[in-house]
Image (spheres, grey):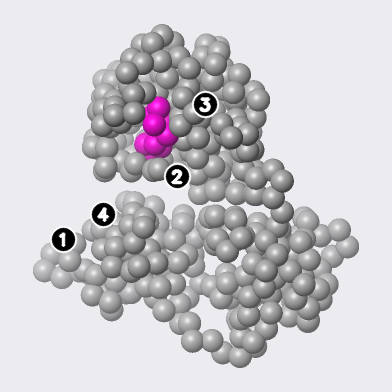
Amino acid sequence: MKLVQRAAWGARPSRYDLAYIASTEGVKVHYEGTYVPKSLADPDAHGACAGRMRDLQASHLANRTEDYSDIAYNAVVCPHGYCFEGRGLHRKTGANGNSRLNAEDYAVCAMLGASGLVVPPDAMLDGLVDAITWLRNSGGAGGRLGGHRDGFATQCPGSRLYEWVQSGAPRPDGSGLPLPGGGAEKGAGPARYRVTIGGLAYGYGATGAHVTAVGEALVDGGFGRHYKTGPGPRWTDADTLNYQAFQLAMGYTGTAPHQDADGVPGEVSLHQLLGYLPGKKTTSSAPPYPGRSAFVLGKSNPAVTVLDGGLVRKGYTRHRAGAKYVPGPLFSENCRRNVADFQRATPALAGDPDGCPGPLTWRLLLS
């Protein structure tokens, strides 16, 4: 996913605090609906897309009739396949037509017009799939997918894009849109490999009383819908799918094999599920990952104090308001920047130093 965050495209601050939303029923697809020059899709024209984002935000902030608090969309996708962060994850959109519709679905807009650029380029379709997947995996979006017109009397998102939405929003190569919550693409199955934690095997084919204990804990936590006869001592695909649902609820993303939410346990998630780690003691001292919802810019959560402690211990405190960095529960911009410094300095994290702590950042910072 080619994500362009708000700071990178020069977003202005929101006029009001954006309403938090834990999850939605799905995603509505939009288009600009005005004239969009065909030249915007030229291979060398991507440099103009950030400016178009700023123009879109400015036009929404200037709309006193709607009294938008920010750009209306959660994400906007340019013709080159880049996903520009609008209101972002867990923020109620302002684009779907009324307050009820805005609470039911996220809104993703394509830089596509009613005239000029009216045919979505392949790169744009790829980017739209990436944006929808991002909202599903990280923002709690459900499986419903529609066009703006499906909830409100409008021509949006235009005939070409609406036909694509109705066909299931496939990628140009024909692959399917990932299932809600980060399920595998059509044709792919659950991860089938094993890991060893504390001397005990977990994953497809592993056997033992410890496997039964995991299954029972999943059922107790409400993550047992894939079992047909109940958990047992042999790890099956049902265990993997149920464990994946638990990982996604923790805030993990990435469901391909060997990613964070592929349904195979790691130490942090296993400790979170069971309250302890069976078998031999491990060397990891990181507390269980609290989930991405603990790290919302401008919001407080006890996990941020723990995160700050790790930043202080490892010396990533150059961004601060006073003479020294003071740990606390508020996930501030200074905290985010310090996390980004740690990520840039850590090879396993340097590819995406966005300052937003994921499970791997949490573990490496606090271990």
Mark 2 or 3, closer to the camera: 2
Pointers 1 and 2 in contact (C-beta within 8 Å): no
Residue 24 figure quarter: top right
Nearer to us in this view, 222 or 257: 257
The residues bearing labels 1 and 3 have C-alpha atoms spaced at a distance of 40 Å
Question: Reading the chain from its start, which is encountered first: label 2 or label 4?
Answer: 2
Residue 366 visible here: yes
- Residue at position x 62%, y 70% in the image: 265
Secondary element under disc 3, as helix, strand or loop, is: strand
- In the image, 328: left or right of 220? left
Tell which residue pokes out farthest to the left in this image. 323
Tell me the amino acid under the disc marked 1. Ala
Say whether residue 68 is magenta.
Answer: no
The residue where tag 2 is placed is 1
- In the image, 26: left or right of 241? left
Tell me if residue 277 comes above or below residue 247 in the rendering. below
The residue where tag 1 is placed is 321
The residues bearing labels 3 and 4 have C-alpha atoms spaced at a distance of 30 Å
- Residue at position x 61%, y 19% in the image: 163
